[in-house]
Image: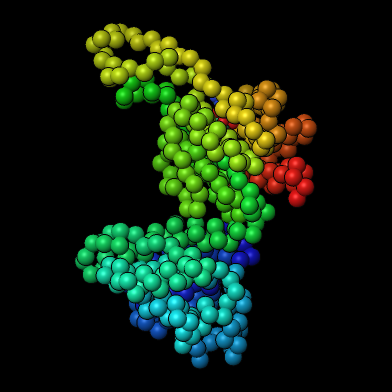
Amino acid sequence: MLTNKTVVLGVTGSIAAYKAADIASKLVQAGAEVRVVMTESATEFVSPLTFRSLTNQPVVTGMFELASEFSLEHVALAEAADVVVIAPATANIIAKLAVGLADDMLSATVLATEAPVIIAPAMNVNMFQNSVTQDNLAKLKARGFTIVDPAYGRLASGKVGLGRLAEVEKIIGTIKQVLGRSGDLAARRIVVTAGGTQEAIDPVRYVGNRSSGKMGYAVAEAARDRGAKVTLITAPSALSEPVGIDVVHITSAVEMKEAVTRACAQADALIMTAAVADYQPKSTARQKIKKEAAGAGLTLELVKTPDILAEVKGDFLRVGFAAETEDHVANARQKLAKKQLDLIAANDVTAPDSGFTVDTNRVTLISRDGKVEELPLMLKREVADKILDRVVGMLAEKGGR
Ligand code: PMT
């Protein structure tokens, strides 16, 4: 969430300028106040009116035609910014910034700002790979700018190579990560698990469950946006990898346990949203089991998987989820005690708008001291923030900050 944040979005003269409209729109949807500064050549590609309409704010296009709010004081935008993002950034603006030129409103704003600056280059592959551009980017990186590397793909010139503007989601994720650096989880290490483990029966079949990973990814992203260093250990999921998070892909419960053990060696908190299979086939067939050989019925012998939450040792907070279809609070309380957790989210998975695969969830938080807080139906991201509010409080109690 970017509520109360001012994002100055610089748009320069690249064919990818139209993608900046999507960036502006998504930032506004996330709650940010977006101030667009366009270079003169950017206005050849997209009309300032597009950005004005999307952001509901005046668009700055030149040093001497400032909107009334910013009149005369050419550094006012620089001071208002919580972050400055240039997307797309041409080789030309990158070169100007590298040498400290300030001959247009965008370069002047960057030179004058104390806010973090993010650059998302987009240009022809030869221009991008030219050592001058690479040196300029290295200089900016050394000065603390964040570079969102361009993607490989088909460019406007028809050539294929590095130079396409990074995916909009990647740019937005980077903005959230950069803005979160001073959040209430700054310098904390949080390990999150997500998705449903898959326990192989043979090379093509598995025992699994309906977890999509949405709840876990929401917790991981929320922790990142509050400044935490996050490791997300995920079972197979269709969701795209979040930016600014160490993502570890696993398949089975045993693999998840190994990854959690490794990641928790330095963790402040482990949040297990994953739906870990409780049982796995006793053995995995090397070849696909043939119907003809199995006959009319197939019996699988299952054995218990390791209980990750209960078994991984270390001095970190433990937060669990309990997916329940009946007596969810009572059952969750038992799991809290048995697995010695600090907090558990009892998840009623019987309602169609709560639990597996949907974007919303309804949970009841139960803490070690027995306190119960029933939360209403919320977006999974909002549930994630409620849990992290508790984690921040518990870490403060534990570590004195
Ligand atoms: O991924 P989504 O589609 O968004 O769905 C989200 C969710 C419904 C999966 C999630 O909100 C949820 O409820 N996750 C916990 C599901 C679950 O398996 O609960 P459980 O009651 O079986 O396990 C209790 C806790 O122990 C969980 O934190 C689980 O991660 C952990 N566990 C379970 C088994 C095991 N072998 N090791 C474990 O660590």
As displayed, is residue 392 above or below residue 126?
A: above
Residue drawn at x 26%, y 62% as measured from the top left: 161
Which quadrant does the N terminus fall into?
bottom right
Q: How many marks?
A: 0
As displayed, is residue 360 above or below residue 257?
A: below
Hey, which residue is sitting farthest left in the picture?
158
Q: Is residue 177 left or right of residue 236?
A: right
- The answer to whether any part of residue 248 appears in the image is yes
Quadrant of the image occupied by residue 364:
top right
Residue 33's x, y, as percent?
58, 69
Q: Is residue 210 left or right of residue 285?
A: right
Name the quadrant where ligand 1 sits: top right
Residue drawn at x 70%, y 34% as measured from the top left: 342
Closer to the camera, 245 or 365? 245
As displayed, is residue 92 above or below residue 65?
A: above
Residue 83's x, y, as percent?
56, 69
Quadrant of the image occupied by residue 374:
top right
Q: How is the image coloured?
A: rainbow
Closer to the camera, 129 or 18? 129
As displayed, is residue 332 above or below residue 319?
A: above
- The answer to whether any part of residue 364 appears in the image is no
Residue drawn at x 26%, y 15% as measured from the top left: 290
Residue 59's x, y, as percent?
50, 79
Residue 62's x, y, as percent?
47, 87
Residue drawn at x 43%, y 62% as measured from the top left: 148
